[in-house]
Image (cartoon, helix red, strand yellow):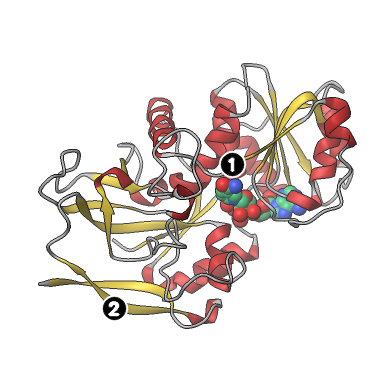
Amino acid sequence: MAIRNRVWEIKDSFGLENLKQNERTVPEMIGDNEVLVRLTATSLNYRDYLMVIGKYNPRQKLPLVPCSDGAGIVESVGKNVQKWRKGDRVLPIFAQGWMDGSPDLESLRTTLGGPNDGCLSEYGVFAESGLVKTPDHLTDAQAATLGCAGLTAYNAVVRFGGIEPGSSVLCLGTGGVSLFALQFAKTMGAKVIITSSSEEKLERAKQLGADETINYSTKSNWEREVRKYTDKKGADLIVEVGGAGTLSKSMMCVRPYGTIALIGVLAGGESNLSLYPILMQGVKVQGVIVGSKNDFEKMNQAISHNKIIPVVDRSFSWEEVPQAFEYLQSGKHFGKVAIQWA
Ligand SMILES: NC(=O)c1ccc[n+]([C@@H]2O[C@H](COP(=O)([O-])OP(=O)(O)OC[C@H]3O[C@@H](n4cnc5c(N)ncnc54)[C@H](OP(=O)(O)O)[C@@H]3O)[C@@H](O)[C@H]2O)c1
């Protein structure tokens, strides 16, 4: 017997217009070490959008179910599974083969939402080791934001950031990663400066705890403002999601021997950047790739202990998947865009 499984998939060719609903099946009898999860929610990452339109990996094999993030409930377990039972609330991990430490190239090829099918699906079959427990205080839509944006921000701030109480952290923009970074940095007692193109979003960021705000649309020399807000010392950590379009300014407002966590390329991925500031000021430019299962579990402990609630701007229904992607692409969101169907 097989279970009917509705999915959204990119079938024959890339493009948001080619993201369609389809019906697949999952086997009722799963492998001995596998877990069948009834998925209930996902959240969108910019990577998912790039994947759908064919810009993330034009050689990605199709059909593909997009979306690396998910949340759900265990439906059944294989006979060797020890850790999970029917009814447990779980979250699939981003790279199913990356358990701990630094990733190897092979484990980086085990990511959900490309190259492997993702979570925009009513059911998913995962290895016992490919899941973590959902923090109890979160809804599934909130928890479905943790696997990619949450974990990336956690690693940028907690693992690589070298943050202490009183450190200064600059977050660029008010997207998913930046708002998680704001929340983690505030929890650690840091001073947070955040930029946005919108006054209204900056107001909302203040309510979340941001200490200083800068509108990068009206203040094109925002790096000077950052220096001003850090007593001319420069920020200890910059959560860099802009990439080529913002990195040279970030280098001008990070402190000597400070860290730039290079996470995204929202403002371009190629650049003829001068390397002198890195060299002359000992700046550490640290690329971040989401994180391991062990990082995810540690982050969830911190989230549970501090009762951190992810910022979900809007939650869409199953039928509204294309609209959810369009909303993400519009840049109108503050924090995360979720999709919940059960
Ligand atoms: N390396 C990794 O492991 C990893 C993991 C997750 C995400 N990422 C990448 O990180 C980036 C951010 O991801 P996200 O999920 O947070 O995206 P998102 O939620 O879509 O964030 C979009 C927001 O970024 C801000 N932004 C856009 N261009 C900007 C610029 N030039 N300067 C400052 N802010 C700008 C805007 O904020 P305002 O509207 O406030 O202006 C925009 O609303 C993406 O490139 C994504 O692919 C990488």
Locate residue 13, reporting x and y percent.
52, 81
Look at the image and tell me in which quarter the N terminus lies: bottom left
Q: Residue at x 39, y 73 (%)?
A: 8
Q: Is residue 320 above or below residue 204?
A: below
Q: Residue at x 49, y 48 (%)?
A: 148
Q: Give the distance between the C-alpha atoms of the residues marked 1 and 2, in whole angstroms.
A: 36 Å
Q: Is residue 277 left or right of residue 243?
A: right
Q: Is residue 278 visible?
A: yes
Q: Is residue 197 visible?
A: no
Of the pair 230 and 12, the residue shown nearer to us: 12
Q: Residue at x 86, y 47 (%)?
A: 273
Q: Secondary structure at mark 1?
A: helix
Of the pair 328 and 57, the residue shown nearer to us: 57
Locate residue 254, reporting x and y percent.
79, 30
Q: Which mark is residue 66?
A: none
Check if mark 1's residue and mark 2's residue have beta carbons within 8 Å: no
Look at the image and tell me in which quarter the C terminus lies: bottom left
Q: Is residue 324 left or right of residue 247?
A: left
Q: Is residue 98 above or below residue 164?
A: below
The amino acid type, in three-letter code, at marker 1 is Leu
Q: Earlier in the sequence, mark 1 or mark 2?
A: 2
Locate residue 204, reporting x and y percent.
62, 43
The amino acid type, in three-letter code, at marker 2 is Glu
When asked about the image quadrant of residue 283, the answer is: top right
Pointer 1 residue: 179
Of the pair 260 and 33, the residue shown nearer to us: 33
| Mark 1 surroundings within 10 Å by alpha-carbon count, few (fewer than 14), some (14 through 19), many (20 or more) | many
Q: Is residue 41 left or right of residue 13?
A: left
Q: Secondary structure at mark 2?
A: strand
Q: Is residue 285 above or below residue 106?
A: above
Pointer 2 residue: 23
